Image: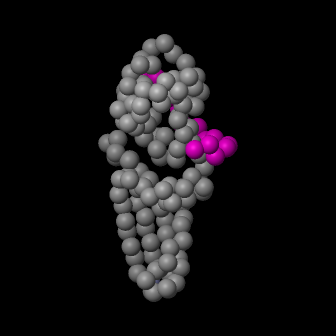
Amino acid sequence: MAKVLKVCDCGSTSFAEVGQSFCSGTLKWYLSFRCNNCGKTNEVDGVDIPPELRNAIIDQEGVWGLFINNSENSMSVIFSTLRKELNLSLAEIASIRKKVPGVILTGTKIEMERLREILSSTNMPISVVKLEDKTC
Ligand SMILES: [Zn+2]
């Protein structure tokens, strides 16, 4: 969970908590705000996370990667699943393929964990790793 500053209607500024979750493969985000001054609360959630909130999560929780080991088996299943799930072009899939074995995609921790769960049916050795550099 990351924290972002929000200005309340009363004019004072408090921290809101922002995070992501996934359920049945669907990625969601939420924001939970409570004003320290007037006590007003605000809960927001949705599917498409606003870029500034995603950036706050990346800043505070780091960049995470989806690591795939090399294997001849079920590679095409993985890439066809990723292509459908992320709406990737064939060119994008081709460049991702070149990164195997290694980190093929980066994003927030929850985004990568969601992909790992979606790909778990392929029985491939897939792990979610924290990256040192902010590469996305
Ligand atoms: Zn307030």
Residue 135 is inside the magenta segment: yes
Q: Nearer the viewer, residue 19 or 11?
A: 11
Residue 53 is inside the magenta segment: no
Number of labels in the image equals: 0
Q: Position of residue 102 (x, y in %)?
A: 59, 27
Q: Quadrant of ligand 1?
A: bottom left
Q: Which residue corresponds to the image point at 46% horizontal and 44% vertical from the top-left? A: 111
Q: Residue furthest top?
A: 72
| Residues shaded magenta | 122-136
| Residue 31 figure quarter | bottom left
Q: Is residue 125 visible?
A: no
* Side of 94 relative to 22 (left or right): right
Q: Nearer the viewer, residue 114 or 51?
A: 51
Q: Position of residue 73 (x, y in %)?
A: 45, 14
Quadrant containing the C terminus in the rendered view = top right
Q: Position of residue 76 (x, y in %)?
A: 41, 19
- Is the image coloured rainbow, by chain, by secondary structure, or in one colour? one colour
Q: Position of residue 87 (x, y in %)?
A: 38, 36
Q: Which residue corresponds to the image point at 67% horizontal and 43% vertical from the top-left? A: 132
Q: Is residue 108 visible?
A: yes
Q: Residue furthest left?
A: 24
Q: Which residue corresponds to the image point at 45% horizontal and 76% vertical from the top-left? A: 34
Q: Is residue 114 above or below residue 89?
A: below
Q: Which residue corresponds to the image point at 55% horizontal and 18% vertical from the top-left? A: 70
